[in-house]
Image: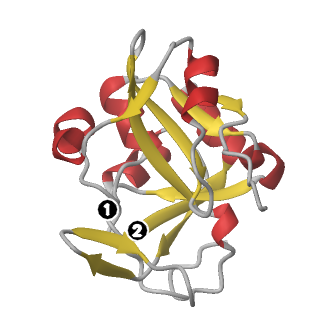
Amino acid sequence: MSKKNKKSKLKKTQVEQILDKNKVPYHQAEFPTHQDGDVRTMSVDHTGVDEHVIYKTLVLTGNVTGPLVGVIPVDTHLDEKKLAKVSGNKKVNMVPLKNLLKTTGYVHGANTPVGIYEKFQYPIFIDQAAKEQGEIYVSSGKIGRSVQLNAEDLANLVHAKFADLQQANYEG
């Protein structure tokens, strides 16, 4: 069962240690990144992984809940009205970049539902597409590093709710 000889193991991130501690199975993944202004961004063009199963972790603040997290495919846009409704807020707004590290403990591009929940227990909402896809990728707390895991395992670990969070595509 062990794949130790197959590939040199990456040093475990804090997120991977949390998954181990909770006996949640996962696979480590690395994606190339590039500098975009003052922000490092993931490039997923040539990695052979469908973008739609790679999820980004967005941190917002609601007028009722305070900070909350939306987890959606990287190739989609968050519908803030839908997130506000399912989270019991009248309105939600993205946390400004300058406040992100203070709010979550992570820099832009490294936010992860696992680490954020472990540290702050913010309410977390995962797009319902993840439930249908089964295995998804989320950040493991370092830029360019992700974990592939079962969406339901992730939701159970971070006490997340599945909901429709994507903006509808209006193609003209």
Type of the residue with mark 1:
Lys
Q: In the figure, 57 relative to 61: above or below?
A: below
Which structural element holds mark 2?
strand
Residue 93 occupies quadrant: top left
Q: Residues within 10 Å of mark 2 (few under 14, many from 20)?
A: many
Q: Measuring 64% from the left and 70% from the top, which residue is drawn there?
A: 51
User: Percent position (x, y) of residue 143?
Assistant: 32, 66
Which structural element holds mark 1?
loop
Q: Which mark is residue 10?
A: none
Q: Decide: marks 1, 2 in contact (CB < 8 A)?
A: yes
Q: In the figure, 128 relative to 10: above or below?
A: above
If the image is split into quadrants, where does the C terminus sit? bottom right
Q: Measuring 24% from the left and 53% from the top, which residue is drawn there?
A: 107
Spatial CA distance of label 1 from label 2 is 5 Å
Q: Which residue is mark 2?
A: 145
Q: Measuring 83% from the left and 48% from the top, which residue is drawn there?
A: 132
User: Percent position (x, y) of residue 146?
Assistant: 47, 64
- In this orientation, which residue lies closer to the viewer: 169 or 16? 169
- In this orientation, which residue lies closer to the viewer: 138 or 15? 138
Farthest right residue? 132
Q: Which residue is mark 1?
A: 142
